[in-house]
Image: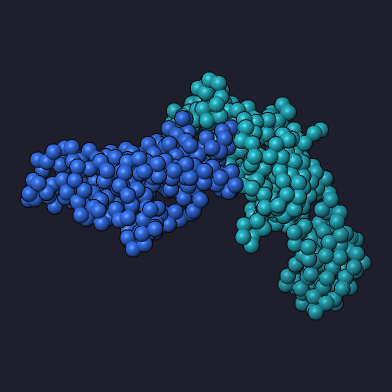
Chain colours: A cyan, B blue
Amino acid sequence: MTDTVVVTELSKWFGPKVAVSEVSIGFGPGVTGLLGPNGAGKTTLLRVIAGLQRPSQGEVTVLGVNPRADSAIYQKMSLVPEDEAIYERLTGRKFVELAARLARVDDPEGRAETVLGTVELLDSAHRKLGGFSKGMRQRAKVAAALVTDPEVLLLDEPLNGADPVQRAQLIELFKDLGAAGRTVIVSSHVLVEVERMADRVVAMVDGRLAAVGSVPTIRAAMTDRPRQVFVGCSEPRRLASALINSDGVVGVHVEDGQLRIEASDAGGLARLLPQIAVDSGISITNVEPLDESLESVFRYLVEGS
Amino acid sequence: MVLARHLYRRLMRKWRVIGLVALASVPGFVYWLAAFDADPDELAGLYSDIIAIAGYSFAIAALILTVATLREERDAGTLPYIYMRPMSRLSLAISSMLAAIAAVLTVAFGGWLTTAMATVALGADISIALPGLALFVAAGIGYAAVFVPLGYLVPRSLLVGLGYIIVIETILASAVPGLAQFSIWRIALSIYADMAPVFGDEASEALGPVVAGVGGGVAKIAGTVLVGLVVLTWALRRRDAL
Protein backbone atom coordinates (compact mmCIF):
# COMPACT_ATOMS: atom_id res chain seq x y z
CA MET A 1 0.00 0.00 0.00
CA THR A 2 1.29 3.48 -0.82
CA ASP A 3 2.66 5.48 2.07
CA THR A 4 0.82 8.72 2.70
CA VAL A 5 3.42 10.04 5.11
CA VAL A 6 7.04 9.59 4.14
CA VAL A 7 9.89 10.51 6.46
CA THR A 8 13.33 10.42 4.89
CA GLU A 9 16.62 10.64 6.80
CA LEU A 10 14.95 12.98 9.26
CA SER A 11 16.93 14.56 12.07
CA LYS A 12 15.82 17.31 14.39
CA TRP A 13 18.02 18.92 16.96
CA PHE A 14 17.61 21.80 19.36
CA GLY A 15 21.04 23.26 20.02
CA PRO A 16 23.17 20.37 21.26
CA LYS A 17 20.19 18.13 21.97
CA VAL A 18 19.28 15.67 19.25
CA ALA A 19 15.56 14.89 19.49
CA VAL A 20 15.21 12.80 16.34
CA SER A 21 18.13 11.17 14.60
CA GLU A 22 18.20 9.91 11.01
CA VAL A 23 14.72 8.45 10.96
CA SER A 24 13.42 7.03 7.70
CA ILE A 25 9.98 5.50 7.69
CA GLY A 26 6.68 5.52 5.84
CA PHE A 27 3.14 5.48 7.19
CA GLY A 28 0.19 4.24 5.20
CA PRO A 29 -3.55 3.90 5.77
CA GLY A 30 -4.52 2.21 9.01
CA VAL A 31 -3.51 2.83 12.59
CA THR A 32 0.20 2.98 13.42
CA GLY A 33 1.29 3.14 17.03
CA LEU A 34 4.31 5.30 17.77
CA LEU A 35 5.68 3.70 20.89
CA GLY A 36 8.49 4.75 23.18
CA PRO A 37 9.34 6.05 26.61
CA ASN A 38 9.12 9.75 27.44
CA GLY A 39 11.87 11.69 25.67
CA ALA A 40 12.12 9.13 22.86
CA GLY A 41 11.38 11.75 20.21
CA LYS A 42 7.77 10.80 19.43
CA THR A 43 6.34 14.28 19.94
CA THR A 44 9.10 15.91 17.92
CA LEU A 45 8.59 13.44 15.09
CA LEU A 46 4.85 14.17 15.04
CA ARG A 47 5.45 17.92 15.15
CA VAL A 48 7.84 17.73 12.22
CA ILE A 49 5.37 15.62 10.24
CA ALA A 50 2.69 18.18 11.13
CA GLY A 51 4.88 20.99 9.81
CA LEU A 52 5.03 22.74 13.17
CA GLN A 53 8.78 22.25 13.29
CA ARG A 54 11.11 22.14 10.37
CA PRO A 55 13.58 19.30 9.96
CA SER A 56 17.19 20.08 10.81
CA GLN A 57 18.05 17.49 8.17
CA GLY A 58 16.10 15.22 5.87
CA GLU A 59 12.56 15.71 4.67
CA VAL A 60 8.93 14.87 5.27
CA THR A 61 6.13 14.59 2.76
CA VAL A 62 2.46 14.20 3.56
CA LEU A 63 0.31 13.09 0.63
CA GLY A 64 3.24 14.02 -1.57
CA VAL A 65 3.54 17.53 -0.20
CA ASN A 66 6.06 19.19 2.10
CA PRO A 67 3.81 20.43 4.94
CA ARG A 68 6.12 23.39 5.58
CA ALA A 69 5.73 24.57 2.01
CA ASP A 70 2.02 24.13 1.34
CA SER A 71 -0.47 25.04 4.03
CA ALA A 72 -3.31 23.60 1.91
CA ILE A 73 -2.23 20.23 3.32
CA TYR A 74 -4.00 21.18 6.56
CA GLN A 75 -7.27 20.52 4.78
CA LYS A 76 -6.20 16.89 4.79
CA MET A 77 -4.02 16.57 7.90
CA SER A 78 -4.80 17.26 11.55
CA LEU A 79 -2.88 16.98 14.78
CA VAL A 80 -4.12 16.44 18.29
CA PRO A 81 -1.29 17.96 20.34
CA GLU A 82 -0.10 16.42 23.57
CA ASP A 83 -0.16 19.70 25.50
CA GLU A 84 -3.12 20.25 27.73
CA ALA A 85 -3.28 23.78 26.36
CA ILE A 86 -6.69 24.71 25.06
CA TYR A 87 -8.81 27.86 24.87
CA GLU A 88 -10.24 27.65 28.36
CA ARG A 89 -12.71 30.50 27.89
CA LEU A 90 -14.39 28.92 24.89
CA THR A 91 -17.14 26.35 25.21
CA GLY A 92 -16.53 22.96 23.68
CA ARG A 93 -18.89 23.84 20.84
CA LYS A 94 -17.28 27.24 20.14
CA PHE A 95 -13.83 25.63 20.14
CA VAL A 96 -14.80 23.03 17.57
CA GLU A 97 -16.71 25.61 15.51
CA LEU A 98 -13.64 27.85 15.55
CA ALA A 99 -11.56 24.97 14.20
CA ALA A 100 -14.16 24.40 11.47
CA ARG A 101 -14.31 28.08 10.53
CA LEU A 102 -10.53 28.41 10.41
CA ALA A 103 -10.45 25.34 8.18
CA ARG A 104 -13.09 26.93 5.95
CA VAL A 105 -15.40 23.99 6.31
CA ASP A 106 -18.87 24.34 4.78
CA ASP A 107 -21.55 24.61 7.47
CA PRO A 108 -19.17 24.88 10.44
CA GLU A 109 -21.97 24.64 13.01
CA GLY A 110 -23.34 21.46 11.49
CA ARG A 111 -19.91 19.91 11.17
CA ALA A 112 -19.10 20.81 14.78
CA GLU A 113 -22.27 19.06 15.94
CA THR A 114 -21.35 15.97 13.95
CA VAL A 115 -17.82 15.61 15.32
CA LEU A 116 -18.89 16.48 18.85
CA GLY A 117 -21.35 13.62 18.53
CA THR A 118 -18.59 11.38 17.20
CA VAL A 119 -16.52 11.90 20.36
CA GLU A 120 -19.68 11.79 22.51
CA LEU A 121 -19.29 15.30 23.83
CA LEU A 122 -22.59 16.80 22.72
CA ASP A 123 -24.07 16.90 26.21
CA SER A 124 -21.15 18.93 27.57
CA ALA A 125 -20.52 21.07 24.50
CA HIS A 126 -22.15 24.13 26.06
CA ARG A 127 -19.66 24.15 28.94
CA LYS A 128 -16.41 26.10 28.94
CA LEU A 129 -13.30 24.07 28.22
CA GLY A 130 -11.72 25.38 31.41
CA GLY A 131 -14.19 23.27 33.37
CA PHE A 132 -13.58 20.12 31.33
CA SER A 133 -11.75 17.14 32.77
CA LYS A 134 -8.52 16.11 31.09
CA GLY A 135 -10.26 13.31 29.25
CA MET A 136 -12.99 15.62 28.00
CA ARG A 137 -10.39 18.10 26.78
CA GLN A 138 -8.71 15.32 24.86
CA ARG A 139 -12.01 14.44 23.22
CA ALA A 140 -12.66 18.10 22.38
CA LYS A 141 -9.22 18.27 20.76
CA VAL A 142 -9.96 15.11 18.80
CA ALA A 143 -13.28 16.63 17.68
CA ALA A 144 -11.50 19.79 16.53
CA ALA A 145 -9.03 17.66 14.59
CA LEU A 146 -11.84 15.78 12.86
CA VAL A 147 -13.69 18.80 11.48
CA THR A 148 -11.91 18.56 8.13
CA ASP A 149 -12.41 14.78 7.94
CA PRO A 150 -8.64 14.48 7.51
CA GLU A 151 -6.90 11.80 5.51
CA VAL A 152 -3.94 11.92 7.89
CA LEU A 153 -4.55 12.19 11.62
CA LEU A 154 -1.66 12.65 14.04
CA LEU A 155 -2.48 11.97 17.68
CA ASP A 156 0.07 12.73 20.39
CA GLU A 157 -0.78 10.73 23.50
CA PRO A 158 -4.52 11.19 22.88
CA LEU A 159 -5.58 8.83 25.64
CA ASN A 160 -3.82 10.74 28.43
CA GLY A 161 -6.26 11.53 31.19
CA ALA A 162 -9.13 9.63 29.63
CA ASP A 163 -10.99 7.20 31.88
CA PRO A 164 -11.29 3.54 30.83
CA VAL A 165 -14.66 4.03 29.13
CA GLN A 166 -13.43 7.10 27.24
CA ARG A 167 -10.27 5.22 26.27
CA ALA A 168 -12.28 2.37 24.87
CA GLN A 169 -14.46 4.81 22.88
CA LEU A 170 -11.48 6.70 21.49
CA ILE A 171 -9.65 3.50 20.62
CA GLU A 172 -12.72 2.28 18.72
CA LEU A 173 -12.92 5.65 16.94
CA PHE A 174 -9.27 5.51 15.87
CA LYS A 175 -9.67 1.92 14.70
CA ASP A 176 -12.74 2.91 12.67
CA LEU A 177 -10.83 5.79 11.07
CA GLY A 178 -7.96 3.45 10.25
CA ALA A 179 -10.36 0.88 8.82
CA ALA A 180 -11.92 3.63 6.68
CA GLY A 181 -8.56 4.16 4.98
CA ARG A 182 -7.29 7.10 7.01
CA THR A 183 -3.66 7.25 8.03
CA VAL A 184 -3.76 7.43 11.82
CA ILE A 185 -0.51 7.79 13.75
CA VAL A 186 -0.97 7.51 17.50
CA SER A 187 1.87 8.09 19.92
CA SER A 188 1.77 6.44 23.30
CA HIS A 189 4.05 5.12 25.98
CA VAL A 190 1.55 2.46 26.99
CA LEU A 191 2.06 -0.74 25.05
CA VAL A 192 -1.30 -2.24 25.91
CA GLU A 193 -3.15 0.74 24.42
CA VAL A 194 -1.10 0.64 21.24
CA GLU A 195 -1.59 -3.09 20.98
CA ARG A 196 -5.37 -2.61 21.15
CA MET A 197 -5.62 -0.16 18.29
CA ALA A 198 -2.57 -0.36 16.04
CA ASP A 199 -1.95 -2.72 13.17
CA ARG A 200 1.66 -1.70 13.18
CA VAL A 201 4.02 -0.38 15.82
CA VAL A 202 7.00 1.92 15.42
CA ALA A 203 9.19 1.85 18.51
CA MET A 204 11.47 4.83 19.17
CA VAL A 205 14.24 5.19 21.71
CA ASP A 206 16.59 8.13 22.12
CA GLY A 207 15.37 9.75 18.90
CA ARG A 208 16.02 6.70 16.76
CA LEU A 209 13.85 3.99 15.34
CA ALA A 210 14.35 0.91 17.49
CA ALA A 211 11.89 -1.45 15.87
CA VAL A 212 9.07 -1.55 13.34
CA GLY A 213 6.40 -4.20 12.96
CA SER A 214 3.52 -5.75 14.83
CA VAL A 215 3.86 -5.94 18.60
CA PRO A 216 4.42 -9.75 18.58
CA THR A 217 7.03 -9.35 15.86
CA ILE A 218 8.89 -6.66 17.75
CA ARG A 219 8.78 -8.56 20.98
CA ALA A 220 10.05 -11.70 19.29
CA ALA A 221 12.80 -9.82 17.50
CA MET A 222 14.01 -8.21 20.69
CA THR A 223 13.84 -11.43 22.67
CA ASP A 224 15.69 -13.45 20.07
CA ARG A 225 18.50 -10.98 19.81
CA PRO A 226 21.76 -12.02 21.56
CA ARG A 227 22.29 -9.64 24.44
CA GLN A 228 25.14 -8.72 26.72
CA VAL A 229 24.83 -7.70 30.33
CA PHE A 230 27.30 -6.87 33.06
CA VAL A 231 26.49 -8.48 36.40
CA GLY A 232 28.16 -7.39 39.63
CA CYS A 233 28.07 -10.02 42.38
CA SER A 234 29.84 -11.27 45.51
CA GLU A 235 31.38 -14.35 43.86
CA PRO A 236 31.72 -13.83 40.09
CA ARG A 237 33.67 -17.01 39.32
CA ARG A 238 31.20 -19.25 41.15
CA LEU A 239 28.27 -17.54 39.44
CA ALA A 240 30.05 -17.91 36.08
CA SER A 241 30.48 -21.65 36.54
CA ALA A 242 26.82 -21.98 37.56
CA LEU A 243 25.69 -20.08 34.46
CA ILE A 244 27.98 -21.46 31.81
CA ASN A 245 25.98 -24.61 31.04
CA SER A 246 22.58 -22.97 31.30
CA ASP A 247 20.21 -22.80 28.34
CA GLY A 248 20.28 -19.48 26.55
CA VAL A 249 23.68 -18.48 27.90
CA VAL A 250 26.13 -18.16 25.03
CA GLY A 251 29.22 -17.04 26.93
CA VAL A 252 30.39 -15.83 30.33
CA HIS A 253 33.49 -13.69 30.93
CA VAL A 254 34.94 -12.41 34.20
CA GLU A 255 36.14 -8.81 33.76
CA ASP A 256 37.29 -6.56 36.61
CA GLY A 257 35.41 -8.53 39.20
CA GLN A 258 32.20 -8.45 37.14
CA LEU A 259 30.59 -10.93 34.81
CA ARG A 260 29.88 -10.14 31.20
CA ILE A 261 27.19 -12.54 30.10
CA GLU A 262 26.17 -13.13 26.49
CA ALA A 263 22.66 -14.54 26.25
CA SER A 264 20.53 -15.58 23.30
CA ASP A 265 17.34 -15.20 25.34
CA ALA A 266 17.32 -12.12 27.52
CA GLY A 267 13.97 -13.00 29.03
CA GLY A 268 15.28 -16.43 30.02
CA LEU A 269 18.39 -14.89 31.53
CA ALA A 270 16.28 -12.45 33.53
CA ARG A 271 14.48 -15.39 35.11
CA LEU A 272 17.53 -17.64 35.45
CA LEU A 273 19.92 -15.20 37.08
CA PRO A 274 18.05 -14.55 40.33
CA GLN A 275 17.17 -18.22 40.63
CA ILE A 276 20.82 -19.33 40.40
CA ALA A 277 21.91 -16.56 42.73
CA VAL A 278 19.42 -17.67 45.39
CA ASP A 279 20.26 -21.35 44.98
CA SER A 280 24.00 -20.65 45.22
CA GLY A 281 23.78 -18.04 47.99
CA ILE A 282 25.45 -15.40 45.81
CA SER A 283 24.34 -11.82 46.18
CA ILE A 284 23.95 -9.79 43.00
CA THR A 285 24.81 -6.10 43.35
CA ASN A 286 23.95 -4.78 39.90
CA VAL A 287 22.79 -5.81 36.44
CA GLU A 288 23.69 -3.46 33.62
CA PRO A 289 22.76 -4.00 29.99
CA LEU A 290 25.49 -3.12 27.50
CA ASP A 291 23.15 -2.13 24.72
CA GLU A 292 21.09 0.48 26.54
CA SER A 293 18.85 1.62 23.73
CA LEU A 294 17.73 -1.82 22.70
CA GLU A 295 17.43 -2.77 26.32
CA SER A 296 15.12 0.16 26.86
CA VAL A 297 12.83 -1.02 24.13
CA PHE A 298 13.02 -4.54 25.30
CA ARG A 299 12.35 -3.67 28.93
CA TYR A 300 9.59 -1.41 27.77
CA LEU A 301 7.90 -4.04 25.70
CA VAL A 302 8.34 -6.76 28.32
CA GLU A 303 7.11 -4.56 31.16
CA GLY A 304 4.10 -3.44 29.20
CA SER A 305 2.94 -6.91 28.29
CA MET B 1 -11.23 37.50 9.31
CA VAL B 2 -12.16 34.56 11.54
CA LEU B 3 -8.62 34.31 12.79
CA ALA B 4 -8.25 38.08 13.25
CA ARG B 5 -11.47 38.13 15.27
CA HIS B 6 -10.30 35.18 17.39
CA LEU B 7 -6.92 36.78 18.11
CA TYR B 8 -8.55 40.14 18.85
CA ARG B 9 -10.87 38.55 21.40
CA ARG B 10 -7.92 36.78 23.01
CA LEU B 11 -6.08 40.08 23.32
CA MET B 12 -9.04 42.03 24.65
CA ARG B 13 -9.40 40.43 28.04
CA LYS B 14 -11.32 42.76 30.30
CA TRP B 15 -8.74 43.42 33.01
CA ARG B 16 -5.87 43.64 30.57
CA VAL B 17 -7.72 46.25 28.52
CA ILE B 18 -8.68 48.23 31.63
CA GLY B 19 -5.07 48.20 32.84
CA LEU B 20 -3.65 49.18 29.47
CA VAL B 21 -6.18 51.94 28.89
CA ALA B 22 -5.23 53.27 32.34
CA LEU B 23 -1.56 53.17 31.30
CA ALA B 24 -2.33 54.88 28.00
CA SER B 25 -4.30 57.51 29.91
CA VAL B 26 -1.26 58.74 31.83
CA PRO B 27 -0.68 61.69 29.43
CA GLY B 28 -4.28 62.80 29.93
CA PHE B 29 -3.97 62.76 33.72
CA VAL B 30 -0.57 64.44 33.63
CA TYR B 31 -1.96 67.13 31.32
CA TRP B 32 -4.93 67.75 33.59
CA LEU B 33 -2.70 68.03 36.66
CA ALA B 34 -0.02 70.13 34.95
CA ALA B 35 -2.45 72.51 33.23
CA PHE B 36 -4.82 72.96 36.16
CA ASP B 37 -3.65 76.47 36.95
CA ALA B 38 -2.06 77.22 33.58
CA ASP B 39 -2.79 80.29 31.52
CA PRO B 40 -5.45 79.50 28.84
CA ASP B 41 -3.01 80.64 26.15
CA GLU B 42 -0.52 78.03 27.25
CA LEU B 43 -2.92 75.06 27.16
CA ALA B 44 -2.30 74.10 23.52
CA GLY B 45 1.50 74.19 23.85
CA LEU B 46 1.36 72.33 27.15
CA TYR B 47 -0.85 69.66 25.57
CA SER B 48 1.70 68.98 22.85
CA ASP B 49 4.63 68.97 25.30
CA ILE B 50 2.99 66.54 27.68
CA ILE B 51 1.58 64.19 25.08
CA ALA B 52 4.98 64.06 23.35
CA ILE B 53 6.82 63.09 26.51
CA ALA B 54 4.30 61.25 28.70
CA GLY B 55 2.97 59.48 25.61
CA TYR B 56 5.66 56.84 26.06
CA SER B 57 3.28 55.24 28.55
CA PHE B 58 1.07 54.48 25.55
CA ALA B 59 4.10 52.99 23.80
CA ILE B 60 4.51 50.60 26.73
CA ALA B 61 0.80 49.74 26.68
CA ALA B 62 1.05 49.06 22.94
CA LEU B 63 4.06 46.84 23.55
CA ILE B 64 2.35 44.78 26.27
CA LEU B 65 -0.72 44.29 24.11
CA THR B 66 0.66 43.66 20.64
CA VAL B 67 3.62 41.52 21.62
CA ALA B 68 1.11 39.04 23.08
CA THR B 69 -0.71 38.49 19.78
CA LEU B 70 1.13 35.31 18.80
CA ARG B 71 3.48 35.00 21.78
CA GLU B 72 0.57 34.12 24.03
CA GLU B 73 -0.52 31.37 21.63
CA ARG B 74 3.03 30.02 21.47
CA ASP B 75 3.59 30.11 25.21
CA ALA B 76 0.19 28.59 25.95
CA GLY B 77 0.77 25.80 23.42
CA THR B 78 -2.37 26.69 21.47
CA LEU B 79 -0.58 27.87 18.34
CA PRO B 80 -1.12 24.55 16.49
CA TYR B 81 -4.87 25.25 16.53
CA ILE B 82 -4.37 28.30 14.37
CA TYR B 83 -1.12 27.43 12.60
CA MET B 84 -2.33 24.10 11.20
CA ARG B 85 -5.06 25.61 9.08
CA PRO B 86 -5.33 25.77 5.30
CA MET B 87 -4.39 29.41 4.97
CA SER B 88 -1.24 30.93 3.56
CA ARG B 89 1.37 32.16 6.00
CA LEU B 90 0.84 35.66 4.57
CA SER B 91 -2.87 35.45 5.45
CA LEU B 92 -1.92 34.30 8.92
CA ALA B 93 0.48 37.22 9.26
CA ILE B 94 -2.11 39.73 7.99
CA SER B 95 -4.77 38.38 10.35
CA SER B 96 -2.37 38.59 13.31
CA MET B 97 -1.40 42.12 12.38
CA LEU B 98 -5.03 43.19 11.90
CA ALA B 99 -5.99 41.77 15.30
CA ALA B 100 -3.09 43.54 17.01
CA ILE B 101 -3.85 46.83 15.26
CA ALA B 102 -7.55 46.65 16.13
CA ALA B 103 -6.70 45.89 19.76
CA VAL B 104 -4.08 48.61 20.08
CA LEU B 105 -6.40 51.16 18.46
CA THR B 106 -9.02 50.39 21.09
CA VAL B 107 -6.47 51.16 23.80
CA ALA B 108 -5.23 54.18 21.83
CA PHE B 109 -8.73 55.58 21.66
CA GLY B 110 -9.13 55.10 25.41
CA GLY B 111 -5.85 56.86 26.08
CA TRP B 112 -6.62 59.73 23.74
CA LEU B 113 -10.13 60.10 25.15
CA THR B 114 -8.61 60.85 28.55
CA THR B 115 -6.54 63.65 27.05
CA ALA B 116 -9.63 64.97 25.26
CA MET B 117 -11.65 64.86 28.47
CA ALA B 118 -8.85 66.66 30.30
CA THR B 119 -8.85 69.32 27.58
CA VAL B 120 -12.58 69.84 27.98
CA ALA B 121 -12.28 69.82 31.78
CA LEU B 122 -9.64 72.54 31.56
CA GLY B 123 -11.90 74.65 29.40
CA ALA B 124 -9.62 74.50 26.38
CA ASP B 125 -10.69 74.15 22.77
CA ILE B 126 -11.18 70.45 21.94
CA SER B 127 -9.48 71.05 18.58
CA ILE B 128 -6.09 71.02 20.32
CA ALA B 129 -6.68 67.39 21.31
CA LEU B 130 -7.86 66.07 17.92
CA PRO B 131 -4.37 65.71 16.38
CA GLY B 132 -3.48 63.66 19.48
CA LEU B 133 -5.73 60.91 18.15
CA ALA B 134 -3.62 60.78 14.98
CA LEU B 135 -0.50 60.46 17.15
CA PHE B 136 -1.93 57.55 19.15
CA VAL B 137 -3.29 55.81 16.05
CA ALA B 138 -0.07 56.14 14.04
CA ALA B 139 2.07 55.04 16.99
CA GLY B 140 -0.25 52.11 17.74
CA ILE B 141 -0.09 50.84 14.17
CA GLY B 142 3.68 51.31 14.03
CA TYR B 143 4.26 49.51 17.31
CA ALA B 144 1.98 46.64 16.28
CA ALA B 145 4.03 46.24 13.09
CA VAL B 146 7.21 45.92 15.15
CA PHE B 147 6.01 44.03 18.19
CA VAL B 148 3.81 41.31 16.62
CA PRO B 149 6.78 39.76 14.74
CA LEU B 150 8.99 40.34 17.78
CA GLY B 151 6.50 38.47 19.96
CA TYR B 152 6.45 35.53 17.56
CA LEU B 153 10.21 35.34 17.18
CA VAL B 154 11.62 36.12 20.63
CA PRO B 155 10.69 34.23 23.82
CA ARG B 156 11.32 37.20 26.13
CA SER B 157 9.90 39.69 23.70
CA LEU B 158 8.38 41.93 26.36
CA LEU B 159 11.83 42.59 27.82
CA VAL B 160 13.33 43.13 24.38
CA GLY B 161 10.49 45.49 23.49
CA LEU B 162 10.96 47.43 26.72
CA GLY B 163 14.65 47.67 25.87
CA TYR B 164 13.72 49.10 22.48
CA ILE B 165 11.38 51.72 23.96
CA ILE B 166 13.50 52.71 26.93
CA VAL B 167 17.03 52.38 25.60
CA ILE B 168 16.66 53.10 21.90
CA GLU B 169 13.62 55.37 21.65
CA THR B 170 14.05 57.46 24.77
CA ILE B 171 17.80 57.46 25.33
CA LEU B 172 19.82 56.57 22.23
CA ALA B 173 17.53 58.23 19.68
CA SER B 174 17.84 61.48 21.63
CA ALA B 175 21.61 61.33 21.42
CA VAL B 176 22.07 59.82 17.96
CA PRO B 177 20.14 61.77 15.27
CA GLY B 178 20.24 58.90 12.77
CA LEU B 179 18.44 56.59 15.20
CA ALA B 180 15.62 59.06 15.70
CA GLN B 181 14.50 58.39 12.12
CA PHE B 182 13.72 54.79 13.13
CA SER B 183 11.83 55.69 16.29
CA ILE B 184 8.16 54.77 15.92
CA TRP B 185 7.16 57.35 18.50
CA ARG B 186 8.99 60.14 16.71
CA ILE B 187 7.56 59.14 13.35
CA ALA B 188 4.06 59.29 14.84
CA LEU B 189 4.98 62.58 16.53
CA SER B 190 6.01 63.99 13.14
CA ILE B 191 2.43 63.44 11.93
CA TYR B 192 1.07 65.11 15.05
CA ALA B 193 3.49 68.02 14.71
CA ASP B 194 2.14 68.77 11.26
CA MET B 195 -1.47 68.70 12.45
CA ALA B 196 -1.23 70.36 15.86
CA PRO B 197 -2.17 74.06 16.09
CA VAL B 198 0.71 74.63 18.48
CA PHE B 199 3.80 72.46 18.87
CA GLY B 200 5.64 73.30 22.09
CA ASP B 201 9.38 73.52 22.74
CA GLU B 202 9.53 70.30 24.73
CA ALA B 203 7.64 68.51 21.99
CA SER B 204 10.02 69.87 19.34
CA GLU B 205 12.94 68.61 21.40
CA ALA B 206 11.29 65.18 21.66
CA LEU B 207 10.77 65.11 17.89
CA GLY B 208 14.45 65.84 17.33
CA PRO B 209 15.72 65.78 13.75
CA VAL B 210 12.64 64.02 12.34
CA VAL B 211 10.89 66.32 9.87
CA ALA B 212 7.25 67.10 10.66
CA GLY B 213 4.81 66.04 7.98
CA VAL B 214 1.68 63.94 7.67
CA GLY B 215 2.61 62.42 4.31
CA GLY B 216 6.12 61.41 5.30
CA GLY B 217 4.98 60.04 8.64
CA VAL B 218 2.15 58.00 7.14
CA ALA B 219 4.50 56.64 4.48
CA LYS B 220 7.02 55.60 7.13
CA ILE B 221 4.34 53.91 9.22
CA ALA B 222 3.01 52.13 6.12
CA GLY B 223 6.56 51.03 5.32
CA THR B 224 6.98 49.73 8.85
CA VAL B 225 3.77 47.71 8.54
CA LEU B 226 4.97 46.28 5.24
CA VAL B 227 8.34 45.29 6.71
CA GLY B 228 6.59 43.82 9.77
CA LEU B 229 4.35 41.72 7.52
CA VAL B 230 7.31 40.47 5.49
CA VAL B 231 9.26 39.55 8.62
CA LEU B 232 6.28 37.83 10.23
CA THR B 233 5.43 35.88 7.08
CA TRP B 234 9.05 34.79 6.79
CA ALA B 235 9.11 33.76 10.45
CA LEU B 236 5.88 31.77 10.11
CA ARG B 237 7.30 29.98 7.07
CA ARG B 238 10.86 29.43 8.20
CA ARG B 239 10.90 29.19 11.98
CA ASP B 240 9.54 26.46 14.20
CA ALA B 241 6.00 27.19 15.33
CA LEU B 242 6.61 25.43 18.66
| Viewer-proximal residue among B206 and B148 | B206
* Residue A144 % position (x, y): 55, 32
| The residue positioned farthest toward the right in the image shown | A245
| Direction from residue A164 to residue A279 in the image, left or right | right
x 65%, y 31%: residue: A76
x 19%, y 46%: residue: B198
* Residue B177 % position (x, y): 36, 59
| Direction from residue A164 to residue A194 in the image, left or right | right
Image-quadrant location for residue A250: bottom right
| The residue positioned farthest toward the bottom in the image shown | A256
| Viewer-proximal residue among B68 and A166 | B68
* Residue A271 % position (x, y): 80, 60
**Residue B156 in sight here:** yes
| Direction from residue A182 to residue B153 in the image, left or right | left
Q: Is residue A275 above or below residue B193?
A: below
**Residue A188 in sight here:** no
x 73%, y 49%: residue: A58
Q: Is residue B50 above or below residue A178?
A: below
Q: Is residue A71 above or below residue B204?
A: above
* Residue B25 % position (x, y): 24, 46
x 43%, y 36%: residue: B98
| Viewer-proximal residue among A108 and A73 | A73
